[in-house]
Amino acid sequence: MSKKKNRHLPKEQATPKKGSLESNLIHRIEVGFIKPYVQLCIILIAVISIYGHTLDVPFYLDDNASIKENPAIINSKDISSTWHFEPRRVVPYVTFALNYRLHGFHLYGYHIVNILIHILNALLVWLLISDLKRTPNIIKCIYTQRVFVYLPFLTALLFAIHPLQTQAVTYIVQRLASLVTLWYVASVICYVRSRMSYKKLTASLWNSAAVIFFILAFFTKQNAVTLPLVIFLVEVMFFNDRYYRIFLFIVIMLMYALGWVMLCQILGKPIFSLNTLEALTREGSEASRLSYLATQMYVLWVYIRAFFWPVGLHLDYDISLSRGFGDPGIIFFFTGHILACLIAIFFYSKNRWLTFGILWYYITHLVESSLFPITDVCFEHRTYLPNIGLCLAISTGFFWIQDQFKFKRKTQSILIGLVIVFLVITWQRNQLWRDPIRFWNDCADHSPKKIRPKSELAKHYILNGKHTEALKLLMDIFKNSIQGANQGAALEKEDAFNLMLVLGELGQYETALKIADTFPESKLTPFFRSKLWGNRGYLYLKLNNKEKAEACYRKAVELSNINMDAMNNLGQLLLDKGNVEEACPLFRSILKIDSMHREANHNIKFCL
């Protein structure tokens, strides 16, 4: 009787060489790696090992405006408040509201959710490649068994541990980038499974799930609009039915039309209006579309360099808008992207995985790196979804080199070394996120002409009692502002408020009050007007003018019911006057917003 062959093992491993202990050990390890649960466990352990120490990373930048100082989150009673705040991104803001309801401003909960989403994304990447390798056009291609066994694992592992992904995972508010990826990849998987289903009912269910995930992605982040293009790419590359492609193209066009009508209805904009098109296809930037596109030709190479050489990663890149395609450098960068796409097309029949990875990368960058101007031209978290394509390309590249040049041991050693390097860099990058002063110092070193890193560094100097260092930075910022280097009113108000506090701490009360009195209050939102009045109250309190300080604090509390500093300071003044009945509700209100508030927890004891 003939022995049955193990069909689950690669051809290279079906008949292992007997002999040395080393060869037998290597064989056992390789056989173990074939099992899906082993691969997924390795990915899970890798993510926990490099992100497990980030649960105390504080709020950064937009975390404050989007979560900690957002009335839609703090005062939310149902989904309507988050819907009114930002309907186009309602899904992630609902998750922030749920986080807040469960544990307030305790950081660990926000980070646990972000890490879980990242783990799920890595598992979905594994599942996507595993499903695609069973499609008709891949089955017909000539690939070694090793590619089919290890490609999903290697792609998902690189995606999970790459240092460039840290900004989308560790920076809390960039859950938008990781969450849209979750729905995005899930939708593609559902589409592939619908195409692989032989029963109409099963195919319909998978298609319905794909549409649901697309809707969730659509209401998570704007780059979800590229999803139908990726699904069409999947159809062209992995399936054979030409008539179905025509049908799918028509469906996609109808989906885009329906999506546009729905978005205009939600935002109350006229459907057939060029002004609506102009308003909804830019975000806070007055740059011309061609200028922004030209700039992105360079920015995309910054992203690609950071993927293959993840050194010097930082939050705030100093990249100026290009003058346009008249710049010879931009023509050079643009030509490079054209060549990359031509290489992808050239390898279409030889290595379809490589083609798919490169085209995925460019398609998923279309919203944030094309003709839709955004104020900040470069952010690392925008590469989170596109990086799936590069992880696939680099993974299949390793196997292609192995098969073409028979460098199995050498490529394996390089690959293991690459994984170790990525793990170390990612862990170190996350460690830097834990210390805001080190983090912003590092960012300021990489972008010395940028105002924002210095502004944030000054804020954290104040929080740590380093007022002299903060004053030096703030004076430098205002010096640049006078010379026209500073752009953006938001930065100006934050810096002005911080300067008032620093001057107050250093005893220069009159100078600080002049800044407060001359600041254009009419340009501020109610919350920032509240902060301005709170700063006035703090300065009058330093001057021992408690009557004016109380009046300012009352004005601040009237303008915003989430300005906890103003509420606490007003409560302390009232306690000093013996007005316990009016002071105690203020402390209770603070603790409802933030149960960890140190001063309110101390002051509430006097109300018992």
Image (cartoon, rainbow, N blue to C red):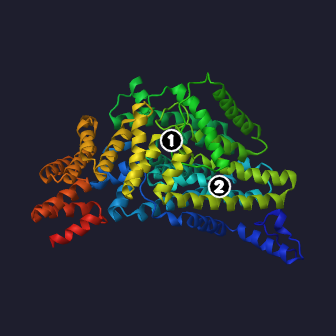
How many numbered circles are shown?
2
The answer to which quarter of the image holds residue 464 is bottom left
Mark 1: few/some/many CA within 10 Å (<14, 14-19, 20+): many
x, y percent for residue 131 = 65, 55
Q: Position of residue 92 (x, y in %)?
A: 41, 51
In the image, 242: left or right of 202?
right
**Residue in view at x 65 percent, y 28 percent:** 329
Classify 10 Å Cα crowding around label 2: few (below 14), some (14-19), many (20 and above): some
**Dot 1 and dot 2 residues touching (CB under 8 Å):** no
User: Which residue is depicted at the point 57% across and 32% down?
Assistant: 295
- The answer to whether one can see residue 273 in this image is no
Q: Secondary structure at mark 2?
A: helix
Residue carrying label 1: 223
- In the displayed structure, 435 sits above or below 522; it is below
Residue pictured at 10% horizontal, 62% vertical: 577
- Image vertical order of residue 306 relative to residue 115, above or below: above
The amino acid type of the residue labelled 1 equals Asn
Q: Three-letter amino acid code at disc 2?
A: Asp
Residue 556, disc: none
Residue 332 vs residue 601, the one in the foreground = 601
85 and 54: which one is in front?
A: 54
N-terminal of the pair, mark 1 or mark 2, is 2
- Secondary element at image label 1: helix
Q: Position of residue 469 (x, y in %)?
A: 42, 51
Residue furthest front as drawn:
507
Let me know if residue 217 appears in the view.
Answer: yes
Q: Is residue 337 left or right of residue 270?
A: right
The numbered mark at residue 131 is 2
